[in-house]
Image (tube, grey):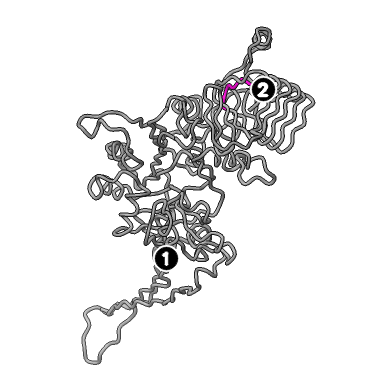
Amino acid sequence: MDSCCATLKTNAHPIGISRESPRNRSSGFWGESLKGSLKCRDLNVQELKNLKIKSKVGKFKPGVAYSVITDIDKETVTYEAPVFETPRADPKNVVSIILGGGAGTRLFPLTSRRAKPAVPIGGCYRLIDIPMSNCINSGIKKIFIMTQFNSFSLNRHLAKTYNFGNGVNFGDGFVEVLAATQTPGDAGKRWFQGTADAVRQFIWVFEDAKNKNVENILILSGDHLYRMDYMQFLQRHIDTNADITVSCLPMDDSRASDYGLMKIDDNGRIIQFAEKPKGPDLKAMQVDTTVLGLNETDAEKFPYIASMGVYVFKTDVLLKLLRWSYPHCNDFGSEIIPSAVRDHNVQAYLFNDYWEDIGTIKSFFDANLGLTEQPPKFEFYDPKTPFFTSPRFLPPTKVEKCRIVDAIISHGCFLRECSVQHSIVGVRSRLEIGVELQDTMMMGADYYQTEAEIASLLAEGKVPIGVGENTKIKNCIIDKNAKIGRDVIITNADGVEEAERSSEGFYIRSGITVILKNATIKDGTII
């Protein structure tokens, strides 16, 4: 019998490791540059090629008898080695949690009767539409929204917009509101004490059978303005085998103390995390941001790496941290993540695009008016990643002999011989003859008044919804359903920075006049 032996022949291919310094790269090595490098999905395993098993006739020794003398031709069988790839991020294995925020005191009076995510923005949207649309566009359709303060308006908007019937169709996904509620036991009688505590109080939901295949949990805020593909973020999380990944961006000196700041090593791992540091602690968090791909000039301008408040956790890691490791820590940014940095793989992901925290009246005002600039810093329209909101089925806006410059006019408005400059006019707004609107964010109205109702109110000396004739408004936020009379002047000519005039229907915050929801400003008023 011919002897048969197998020979394994491998072709070794050395793996090229680039020794290029991170600061010489054209873009950040976390977010932007990963778009090219990580899509290969074979960074760590080289394909084995030309694995050959050869069967050949053995060499006969003289004088040795063989029982079988069948001749076997030489055969070569080539096997293709399996290709090992980094797992691709699957949106079906992800749950998103959108945090409804606290009392929203810095956005007061806009939050006096609504939650922060329900605050209108951009003429026809609400802040909650930002993370919701980002999730939908990323393919993530398992979404929880946690609410606590003034949630009626938010719940109504979610029900109208993101349901299984008339709104956005989610297929096998879901959108569920987790409202703060009381449960048995002393701990169950508390309000949410912070972002982490809110998730902890509903930890049983994420252990439910329908969420058994969820591998990662995405934590989002309901009061940010940005457009983001969460699947790229998630892919970075998977590629680095991170327990937690934090989305971050470069930050300048003027605003750094308002955010959680971090230090990272050359591999993008977070080695230090400080939540809203002040004074010497702030200066200690300065880093060389050329490591993010910034040039020397931008690196001097943005010497900090700030957290966006957008996190992704491995599900088992999150549940362990909340239940066992840090059961008394109530906030992700100030407690959970700084503690987890010590003994978990916490990675940073660079988001190199527009992002704004709508946390104060000034940031809200500036972000809205920024939409009217040319070119805008951010715009809601994108054919591939649209932003969704409640379908209102309003008629087109009617404009009669108006002057409109750098403005956004929402649908269902009536503008008559007025001037609108560098302003946003919300849905169902009414501007009468001679009105001048400049540097103003007008939210619009929840309902129409008929021409007969308007005429009747004017005849009685009352003020209908909208802005009356010959009124001049500048540097102002006008909340919904506001009734502003004729010959009113709202310019804050005295430059007052802060004022509380709720009885008169307005506040002044950071020099910006805020007309309250449903307020009435009588004819001839000067603010």
Q: Residue 234: within the magenta?
A: no
Q: Quadrant of the N terminus?
A: bottom left
Residue 116: which numbered mark, if any?
none
Magenta stretch secondary structure, dominant: loop
| Front residue of 189 and 164 | 189
Q: Which percent across, then down, holds residue 310?
A: 43, 47
Q: Quadrant of the rendered structure where residue 343 is?
A: bottom left
**Rendered residue at 51%/53% (across/down):** 351
Magenta span covers which residues?
479-484
Q: Which percent across, then down, holds residue 268?
A: 42, 62
Report whether 47 appears left or right of 391. Answer: left
Q: Which residue is mark 1?
A: 267
| Front residue of 22 and 112 | 112
Work out whether 327 lies above or below 526: below
SS category of the residue bearing label 1: loop
Q: Which percent across, then down, holds residue 78?
A: 40, 70
**Rendered residue at 30%/83% (across/down):** 58
Name the residue at the bottom extreme: 62
**Rendered residue at 57%/42% (across/down):** 385
Q: Which residue is mark 2?
A: 467
Report whether 406 appears left or right of 129. Answer: right
Inspect the image, locate mark 2, and give the three-letter code of the amino acid beneath it: Val
